[in-house]
Amino acid sequence: MTNINKIKALLRKELLLETRQQHTLYGIMLYIASTVFVIYLTMESPDSETWNGLFWITQLFICINAIAKSFLQEAKGRMLYYYSITPPSVFILSKLIYNVVLMLVMSSINLLLYAAFLGSPAVSFLQFYLISLMGAAGLGLIFTMLAAIASKAMQQASLMAILGFPLIIPQLLLMIRLSKTAFAEVFREGVPLQLVMLLAALDILIVLLSVILYPFLWKD
Amino acid sequence: MRLSWWKLTSIFLLVYAVVGGMFLPVPELPQLGETIRNLYYHVCMWFAMMILFTVSVIHSIKYLRKGDYTHDVKARSYAGVGTYMGILGYATGAIWASYTWADPNNPAYASFGSIMREPKLIGAAIALLIYGAYFILRSSINDMDQRARVSAVYNIFAYAMLFPTIWIIPRLLPSLHPGQEGNPALNFNDIDSRMRMVFYPAVIGWTLLGAWIATLKIRYTILLEKKWNNNEK
């Protein structure tokens, strides 16, 4: 089987697991809904700056919850089985792709709920939607690798947050800055494009590092 | 007891940095006054921290390539001393800022919120948080071999993410801190030539002192391991 086919097969397995164990998927959706609802009750009508900050913090917590399980659910025996059938780079790539897709879906739901409960300060909703998808993909990538690291230690979920927060700061700041373009804030020409390129470069860096470093994690 | 040449160099350079730093002439600037002498201690701490963290990452890479346990001990010790230097960097920076940046009408701690937003401080905070997380990660894995491997992976991953951070954040936020574009201390126009005479030796001296402390820790840890292994037999 070629590597592309292997990735496809692994992705199909993830999807199949997700449809078989629907409670985890619904669990995350409920998590999003209740978080947004709590924010809605505590903040009556946040201004665009606060809205933006809250939105990205919510994205961050959704990401931790959605992705923490991606390595937790793999039992030891099953990891051994993967070990015997795929090279590590293929395995981590399939995880990265799957988590990015998962985050894209969850981030869409999140944005939808935000717009419904708290209104949307964005002048161009579509633009903000695309920016939020980009941010979600970046968060998904970085936390996949951290979940892989944390899955080797005890108290994984909280450890993942500790490991991830310092690393996520530049991305979050870039995303918050970029989001403001959708709020009709005027930027110097070329700056938004520059921010997008920076984020894309960071994402590529994360993928490369994951593919290089994961083989060392995976041996037991 | 005989000391090797680099330890003697360290002692000599630090004596020079302390004596020279206190007594040699410095440029007179209205805002900074004599506090400018803190450059020899504050900036050197950050230099030493980054150099020690870099050495730690190099040992992590070596560990992953060779699997030799001593590299893990070295990576851990250098990271530990680097963190210590970072905390000292914060302490010296806080003293400096309380004389130059803090609002004189309020007590110094009231300016904390606005000072912490400095991009350079954020970068430094991220570096310290990363290595804090690194030690937590280490302590939460019991198996020695696995601990070494997993923490080496995190060390490399985090270090590689730290550099874009240090490069990106200053361009996103406004700053009072010197060196808006790039590195303040390496820019030859930023620093007076009289100060350079003390500053560069001081950087080398503090870094060597950090390495010295780290080597002591490494030897101590390895001896301890040996003792435990002998007791088991």
Image: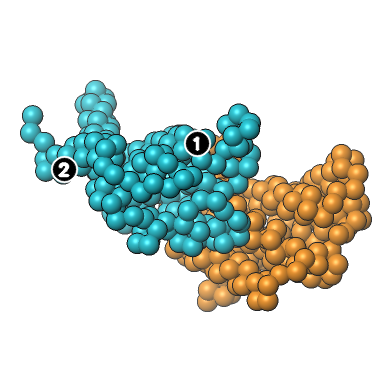
Q: Chain of mark 1?
A: B
Comparing B24 with B69, the one in front is B24
**Do the residues at discs 2 and 1 belong to one chain?**
yes
Residue B71 shows up from this direction: no
Q: What secondary structure is marked by label 1? A: helix
Chain B representation colour: cyan
Q: How many marks?
A: 2
Residue A205 sits above or below residue B33 on the image: below
Dividing the picture into quadrants, the one containing residue A145 is: bottom right
Q: Comparing marks 2 and 1, which lies closer to the viewer? A: 1
Q: Position of residue B131 (x, y in %)?
A: 46, 42
Q: Position of residue A198 (x, y in %)?
A: 58, 68
Which residue ends up furthest to the left in the rendered image?
B2
Residue A56 shows up from this direction: yes
Q: Chain of mark 2?
A: B
Chain A representation colour: orange
> Mark 2 sits on what residue?
B9
Q: Tell me which label, 2 or 1, sits earlier in the chain.
A: 2
Comparing A48 with B27, the one in front is B27
Instruction: Give the residue at x 24% y 36%.
Output: B19
Q: What secondary structure is marked by label 2? A: helix
Dividing the picture into quadrants, the one containing residue B104 is: top right
Is B196 on the left or on the right of B134, as rendered?
left
Instruction: Give the residue at x 46% y 57%.
Output: B179
Q: Position of residue B6 (x, y in %)?
A: 16, 44
> Mark 1 sits on what residue?
B99
Is B188 on the left or on the right of B232, as rendered?
right
The kind of residue tagged 1 is Tyr
Badge 2, how many Cα within 10 Å: few under 14, some, many 20+? some
Instruction: Give the residue at x 55% y 41%.
Output: B101
The kind of residue tagged 2 is Thr
Q: Position of residue B26 (x, y in %)?
A: 33, 46
